[in-house]
Amino acid sequence: MVSKNDTPTDQELVSLTLINPEAFGAIMKRYESKLRRYIQRISRFSDDEIEIILQDAFIKMYRYINDYDHSLAFSSWAYRITHNETIDRIRKNKRSEYSTSLDDDEENLIEKIASDDTGIAEAIDTEIQKKSVLKILQEIEPKYKSILVLRFLEEKSYEEIADILKKPPGTIATLVRRAKEKFRKKASEADKRIKETL
Amino acid sequence: MNIKENVLQTIREKHITPLSRWKFTVRNGLMWVLIYTCAVLVIILISISMFHLGNGNNAIFDDLETPMTDQIITIIPLFWIGTTFILALIAFLIFKKTVGYRRATMHFASLFLLVATICGAIIYITHGAEYLERAVGSIPYYDNLIPTKRILWSHEEKGMLGGTVVTDSTTTPFSMRDFDGDIWLITGPVYEAEDDVVIGKGVKLGIIGRVVQPRVFEAIEIRTW
């Protein structure tokens, strides 16, 4: 049941969970920090709220574990459930933003997007923009924010994002392009504002 | 207590268990049944639409000197085309929202419509659509949904009378109720009839002939509905 290197795969842990619920603990341990960080990035909820969302997401995963399609990566399925829980909570609360500090990855978001699209690097002053990433992200519509976070911060492939958001890969490619354009526009505007104030 | 412990404790305390696999199997099965049902209905509806478009009404319209625009509005089976479109859309959305998002859905939809049109054409060419049309014609209020024939066969002054036989006769003379509810006596000792015409109570017919007296219509040709 367990793979050769003694570290069970996600699929193996799913099978074990159906026999012994305690095995689900290993899945949670494996994904807790990643999913927590993802919720934080797309919602900016407080730590307490993130904790509740994450718990709800894990309980949902456990209840629906027989619905998990083994042709998908388990991580995509876990991200999908977490994403949906977060979006539901955002809709219920009518707020999605909560001020937090940037982590290293987020500070490097511009470089990450720029490495994918040289136009952005030309359009903005990267050093100044580092300070405005959070504000820029907050100004972007949630669906584009999710796309930017999944692609450039979570570093998911188009196929993985397609599985998480249940949209065709072609649509994801279009959304990524639009999200980058939106980010570039917002970043450029922020850049001008900052330069004017200096 | 960390999240992992919290969740495991909640699972233990609330006796939460994974939902049975069969529930998801049934749900997925129903989804495919719905998709296949929609697909079959789309094929049937395409064949019926073709039947309505190509069942030779054009010549009769010419005889009735109906303007081209009225002909087009009357002939186009909007009900069937609309129903086909809605069912195809439902099948497409179910497919796209469930398993289809990972596939080239538009290519799949285009291919599906092509195959459905070919299958529908085969059913029409082999006269299957005619039988299907008669089958759905027995559905109550169907005539209200498909006004084409009613309009076409409500021109007794121009020799076109349609309706439902109300007597037990198997030949002329017999009585027929037209679409306005008026009862007509159908006469005509010599008339042409399509091979499969069966005259009997409750049967719908289209009759070509002439008005010889008020509410008396002499049949020259009797057609199946």
Image (spheres, coloured by chain):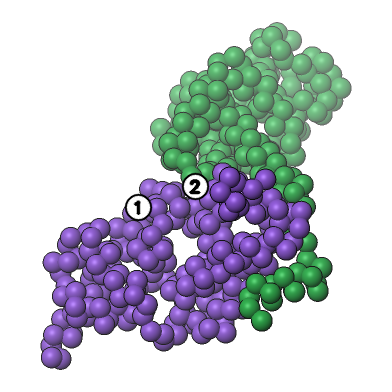
Chain colours: A purple, B green
Which mark is on residue B101?
A: 2
Give residue B116's position: percent from left, percent from top. 53, 28
Residue at 67% in and 25% down: B132
Residue underneath mark 1: A173
SS at mark 2 in the image? helix
The local crowd at label 1, few if under 14, some if 14 to 19, many if 20 or more residues have their Cα within 10 Å, is some
Quarter holding residue B17:
bottom right
Quadrant assignment for the N terminus of chain B: bottom right
Task: Give the amino acid type for the residue marked by disc 1 in the picture.
Answer: Ala
Give residue B212's position: percent from left, percent from top. 67, 22
Please determine whether, in this image, residue B13 is positioned above or below residue A118.
below
Residue at 15% in and 69% down: A123
Nearer to me, A11 or B134: A11
- Does any portion of residue A155 appear in the rendered image? yes
Residue B10 appears left or right of A8: right
Nearer to me, A189 or B158: A189
Return the residue found at the far front. A5
Residue B164 appears left or right of B34: right
Quadrant assignment for the C terminus of chain B: top right
Give residue B110's position: percent from left, percent from top. 44, 34
Residue at 74% in and 32% down: B138
Nearer to me, A112 or B55: A112
Task: Give the amino acid type for the residue marked by disc 2 in the picture.
Answer: Tyr
